[in-house]
């Protein structure tokens, strides 16, 4: 049996639903394939912080109202290094989005699927893409298999791989990813009655090289995470709670997990390689983690997933609906994706090795902790609202240097001795 669509999107999570929604709204006939059987299924390994870079996309998708109605929070990020807190003061006049969103995936994933279905995408749940259809030497759709093992061919002018970090579609298409090692792992758990001092803002401690983070989420749930370098893994495997507590009882301004109610087991994610590949080839496009999956320490994957879905729909929408040649549009998408994200990804991969701060990072962190304008520029880059190579980065460096020179002699915030003595 063979059915014809304009686009077959594999993976009904953030990237796939973003692309499917926007393509369907442009009038394309879209099949949205998801191997999980229920609309309410969701991704479990996520800490749910969506960077401000994605807020314009979230608004254009019409997701903002749905997220807020489900209890999602407008977030921000407060970042601690041994130089003190960086708390960017942002307002409506800021040229960069001032806030992102925090909402658990158990709430968000069903919302994005409903959004895609409301836009007219045909949501096929419980269907796994197991092969690609080829005709005349080019990709011409996907073979999907239901839970009853019945197979169907879904033919389409384009297959959109939105199937995550380990993309099977990429393997089937022969587009291998470039894998860069990741020298950290993550443990996290959910709590109630554990408010953060930062309100709805996340708190991130860069302990150089370990990381810890608190993510306030929807409906009074707070997520506590530790992301240390791999040499600490045996200790975490032995007793995750004790290992996490050893950090949290010493972190400046952190909530004490012992005062809250833990409502989940400790969840460990040990292997999270950094993967990237060209975001398009003839007949196929990659969005979200399938195109680029970076170190979760930076909380960028959800935003990049929503944004790359939009970039793809923008690039190919007209050609798809008007039956024009798709290849130039796909090439535009590939180049745009690379321009916006490749340098960010490179920076995250470099830090994912577990190396200590570089001299430039020390300069940026110490200046941003003392100076509001440096902190604001830092937010533009850190929230990924501009490409890493944008001239904002040059302004940030220049400003940081000036702050460092003019404040010479004034010592930055003191390092608490207890924090210096963290395990490891
Ligand atoms: C520990 C951890 C914490 C993280 N925390 C954050 C955070 O705080 N903020 C942030 O922005 N990012 C975070 N991330 C990253 C974020 O979760 C991902 O970047 C994001 O989910 C990517 O979305 P996606 O739609 O590309 O892929 P996914 O969400 O992985 O979805 C892929 C979808 O494809 C489906 N699928 C796969 N194969 C097939 C197939 N063959 N056929 C049909 N369907 C298929 C899957 O079932 C799934 O629904 C974290 C990641 C980890 C590991």
Image: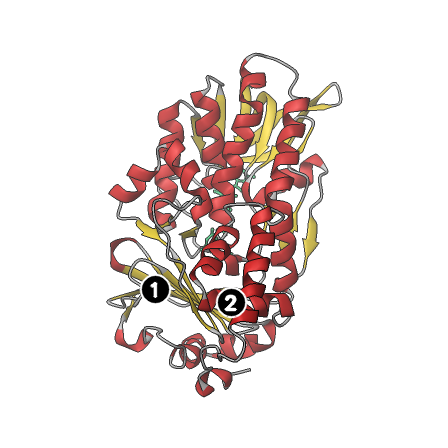
Q: Is residue 194 left or right of residue 77?
A: left
Q: Spot the residue most to the front.
A: 406
- Give x and y (percent) for residue 227: 51, 68
Q: Within 10 Å of the Cα at label 1, are there few (<14), some (14-19), or many (20+) other Cα atoms?
A: few
Under circle 1, the secondary element is loop
The residue sitting at 74% across, 18% down in the picture is 136
Task: Report, in whole angstroms, how far the alpha carbon at label 2 lies from the one at label 1.
Answer: 38 Å
Q: Quick check: 158 above or below 272?
A: above
Residue position for label 1: 264
The residue sitting at 32% across, 74% down in the picture is 257
132 or 177, nearer to the observer: 177
The residue sitting at 50% across, 33% down in the picture is 310
- Give x and y (percent) for residue 228: 53, 71
Under circle 2, the secondary element is helix
Q: In this view, does 372 lie to the left or right of 274?
A: left
Regarding residue 356, the answer to whether it shows in the image is yes
192 or 314, nearer to the observer: 314
Q: Quick check: 264 above or below 412?
A: above
Residue position for label 2: 367
Whether disc 1's CB lies below 8 Å from ligand 1 is answered no
- Give x and y (percent) for residue 72: 30, 48
Question: Which quarter of the image is occupied by the N terminus?
Answer: top right
């Amino acid at each position: 049996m063979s059915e014809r669509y304009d686009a077959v999107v594999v993976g009904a999570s953030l990237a796939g639903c973003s692309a499917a929604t926007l393509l369907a709204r442009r009038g394309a006939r879209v099949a949205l394939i998801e191997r999980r059987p229920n609309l309410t299924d969701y991704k479990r390994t996520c800490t749910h912080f969506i960077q401000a870079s994605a807020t314009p996309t979230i608004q254009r998708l019409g997701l903002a109202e749905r997220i807020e109605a489900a209890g999602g929070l407008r977030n921000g990020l407060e970042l601690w290094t041994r130089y003190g807190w960086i708390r960017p003061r942002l307002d409506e006049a800021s040229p960069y989005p001032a806030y992102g969103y925090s909402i658990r995936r158990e709430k968000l994933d069903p919302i994005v699927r409903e959004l895609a279905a409301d836009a007219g995408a045909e949501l096929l749940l419980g269907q796994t893409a197991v092969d690609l259809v080829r005709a005349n030497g080019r990709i011409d759709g996907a073979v999907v298999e239901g839970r009853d093992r019945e197979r169907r061919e879904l033919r389409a002018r384009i297959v959109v791989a939105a199937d995550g970090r380990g993309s099977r579609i990429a393997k089937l298409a022969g587009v291998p990813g470039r894998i860069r090692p990741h020298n950290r792992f993550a443990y996290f758990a959910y709590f109630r009655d554990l408010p953060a001092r930062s309100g709805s803002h996340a708190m991130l401690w860069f302990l150089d090289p370990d990381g810890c983070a608190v993510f306030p989420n929807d409906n009074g749930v707070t997520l506590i995470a530790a992301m240390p370098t791999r040499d600490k893994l045996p200790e975490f495997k032995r007793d995750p709670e004790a290992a996490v507590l050893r950090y949290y009882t010493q972190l400046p301004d952190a909530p004490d997990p012992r005062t809250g109610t833990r409502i989940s087991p400790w969840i460990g994610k040990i292997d999270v390689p950094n993967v990237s590949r060209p975001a398009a080839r003839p007949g196929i496009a990659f969005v979200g983690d399938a195109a680029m999956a970076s170190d979760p320490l930076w909380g960028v994957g959800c935003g990049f997933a929503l944004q790359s879905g939009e970039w793809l729909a923008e690039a190919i929408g007209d050609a798809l609906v008007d039956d024009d040649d798709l290849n130039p549009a796909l090439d535009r998408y590939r180049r745009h994706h690379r321009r916006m994200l490749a340098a960010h990804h490179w920076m995250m991969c470099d830090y994912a090795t577990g190396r200590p701060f570089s001299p430039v990072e020390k300069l940026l962190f110490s200046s941003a902790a003392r100076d509001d304008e440096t902190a604001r520029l830092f937010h533009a880059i850190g929230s990924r609202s501009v490409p890493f190579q944008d001239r904002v980065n040059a302004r940030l460096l220049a400003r940081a240097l000036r702050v460092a020179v003019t404040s010479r002699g004034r010592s930055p915030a003191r390092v608490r001795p207890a924090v210096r003595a963290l395990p490891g």
